Amino acid sequence: MKNTESSIAYKKRNFITIFTKGDIFSKLSYFICGLANMKNGQIVKGALFLLMEAAYFVFLFIKGIGLLKELGTLGENLQGMVFNEDMGIFEVISGDNSMLILLYGVVTIVITAVFIALWLTSIFSGEHARQLREAGKHVNSFLEDVKSLFNEKIHILLLSVPVAGLTIFTVTPLIFMILMAFTNYDAEHQPPGNLFDWVGIKNFITLLSSSDRLSSTFWPILGWTLIWGVLATFTCYFGGMILAIIINSKGIRFKKFWRTIFVIVMAIPAFISLRIVATMLGERGIFNILLQQWGFTSSSIPFLTNVAWARVSVIIVNFWIGVPVTMLMVSGILMNIPGELYESAKIDGAGPFTTFRKITFPYMLFVTTPYLISNLIGNFNNFGAIYFLTAGAPNSLEYFKGAGKTDLLVTWLYKLTKDSNDFNFASAIGIIIFVISAVITLITFQRSQAVKNEEGFQ
Amino acid sequence: MMKKTVIGLNLDYYIRAMIGAFIGVVCLFAPYTIRDGEWYSFFTAAFKLISIKAGIGLNIFLFLLLPLVILSGVFAVINFVNTSVKGVKIWQAVQIASTVLWTLILFSSKSIFEKAGLYSGFLNKNLSVGYWLGLVSAYFTLVMIMKVSETNTGYIVLSILSIIWLFPVLWILLTALRAEQGYYVGYFFPKGLTLKNFINLFSNGGKLPFGRWWLNTLIVAASNCVINTLIVLGTAYVLSRTRFKGRKAFMNVLMIIGMFPGFMSMIAVYNILKGFGINQSLLALIVVGAAGAAMGYHVTKGFFDTIPKAIDEAAIIDGANRFQIFTRVTLPLSKSIIVYIVLGGFLGAWSDYIFPSILFGDKQSSYTVAVGLFWMTDFKRIDTYYTQFAAGAVIVAVPIVILFIWLQQFYVDGLSGSVKG
């Protein structure tokens, strides 16, 4: 890539020195965006910056300030009935909707953040144009700027759509949600009928350390989530690996046929296969019927309604679904293990078990650690496997309303938002899930070679 | 020990195989079941069944087991006297058949005894030492014969696992074709077969807008394929092949966003969509899917990372700009990863449940198949709709399974790409 910056590096200025050392146009362009661009020959670009600034301030003064002010209180006027003397009846007056106030406030903050980013861009862009001009170099025209989007500025072209999408539909809602964890937006404070308000970290205290039912629900569910995550990940990992080793071992013919059988199970959309198995495991489901006909048991087994059985069932069913995935992945890797390793092991008299323990497994573990970690986090948040199978059942009276003994944190979160509308607790749980995932990722990915060595394959 | 050697056979295990076969024969005379001190051996049970004219039915397993086990013992002797590859292969086939029968007896003893009126309230725990020892020795003998004939014993494991894995698949196929309606039936194989369940799904007589759901999902899936693929490819290319200020920061932000459970902020998404005026429509699903697509860039970036940079540099010398390199050099080299993303986008739309279920609430006409099928299996409706649910599941799953098997190789490439990081 051409490096136009290097020749003028000696004059490079930072955000402050652009102002202090700059001429009057540079200084003014802090307040009138794009002025420096216009002065240095980039009329269209400068005009666009100015337009952007104008649009933002129009928005800010007409709407934005009001929205930001309301954010502090989240609304004060309760919806209620007021006696209309002219008509002689009670009328409903609409109060403030705390939820919309919060959402609009967040949108305003995001718009402001975008504006600040563009404002900084305009300052540096103006400075860049000025330097080029002073050095007697060519200053890009607007058309040339557009062309550069297809070359050295291609990241702006290709990332603008994803960034816009993420900002609107992921980041904004995420900020909204995080803020919600610090309000009392629960079942008793539902807008538009009611207002909710900021409560600080009270929700976290309630969840983590109180004698409240929420707390005595949270810790057992967290415990089960961790157990589930570890068991689900490692059973599928080892099961899939053993299956792949068998299919790929010498002397097995029709490898493709065997692989396809397991791939069929994997290719069926997970919600379908999980719903099917859930109906099969019911009290009058086919499994119970057959087990009785075959004489294994005389009464039906509570696969999904007894706590211990349900927990075992979800892990086994997840095994059924997860093994083919690992099998496929491991099949790909197995072929990469150098064949000489196995031959020398065979000469040394190693049996299949020793070969697995000393060669296959260490190699596999080395290559698949990142996959294993992301899989572990994925399983902590494996909504489908639990929700479609048991929907968290069997429910427990010791738990907060609606939560059940096979619920993971994510499925409980879903129930809190969809069924009981306790958005504040749901958000707090979401933040806790984030913290758990982040900690695991940080610890393991820091050490992992595959991440450090990003350019290792080039 | 035998001192003979035969090419193609490993005779070290022969004695063990022979002992196993003999134990099997002995087990036929040992107690099959015991009750109150009174016991049947396999022979006495078979004679009893014949004498009361119990008919064939499942009893056939028992009648076949006896000659096959004895035959296996006979072959053990014949091969000992005159060892040949062909003889061992025949012995192995006989032993496979007898092992299968030993296993089937486990599942059919109850009906054999109860239908013949020999034993009421039979449970498999009433099976006695003769049976259990016979079962174990059958598998042991089979393994040993396979070792002698130098056949991979993995076949045994694969066969058993295949049956277990395909069992639910078979069940749902049979249910989809079942003429008798309802969730609860007391048998595995349907009494009558019909295609009516499929027809009901699409005709108005079935009252379900399944055709509509299917079409909705197809629209979303097709749009996902195109839009998400473009976004993922663009993002991955830029993050892999170009270096710009804020690149690392951008990747970190994506990683951090990805650690939050995605659907927790759905009420905000719902209201934003309402602000755009597209809530409760398919467009909302497509837009939200596309907006988050960039987060799945990892695998593709890992793939692009493996394409040598020298190729790009050569193209630059030839006067190509970055965009041309992307479209004319990188993409043609990335066929497998493109198929992987397209496939993922297409399949994802068929499985996506949470967001559509929140988005559409009870607006049935906008449902996707995932929401619709889930709705049908609610315990209030399952009795009415179970066979149609099965038919719907088959209709959705069959094309996907075929597509998946056809393009499997690309998926494997993508999967190992994710491993490489």
Image (spheres, helix red, strand yellow):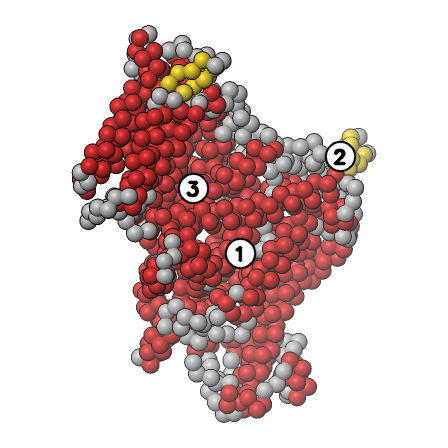
Q: Tell me the distance, in whole angstroms, between the alpha carbons under discs 3 and 2.
A: 52 Å
Residue occupied by mark 3: A269
Disc number placed over residue B327 in the picture, else none: none
Answer with mark 1 or mark 3, whichever residue precedes in sequence: 3
Q: Secondary structure at mark 3?
A: loop
Q: Nearer the viewer, mark 1 or mark 3?
A: 1
State yes or no: discs 1 and 3 in contact (Cβ < 8 Å): no
Q: Image height check: is B275 above or below A301?
A: below
Label 1: which residue? Answer: A373
Q: Amino acid at mark 1?
A: Ile
Chain at tag 1: A
Whole-percent x, y for residue A279 in the image: 48, 29
Furthest-top residue in view? B52
SS under mark 1 = helix
Is residue A67 or residue B174 the one in the foreground?
B174
- Give the CA separation, mark 1 to mark 3: 23 Å
Task: Tell me the residue at 57%/72% (across/down).
Answer: A49
Q: Which dot, 3 or 2, sits closer to the camera?
A: 3
The chain to which mark 2 is attached is: A
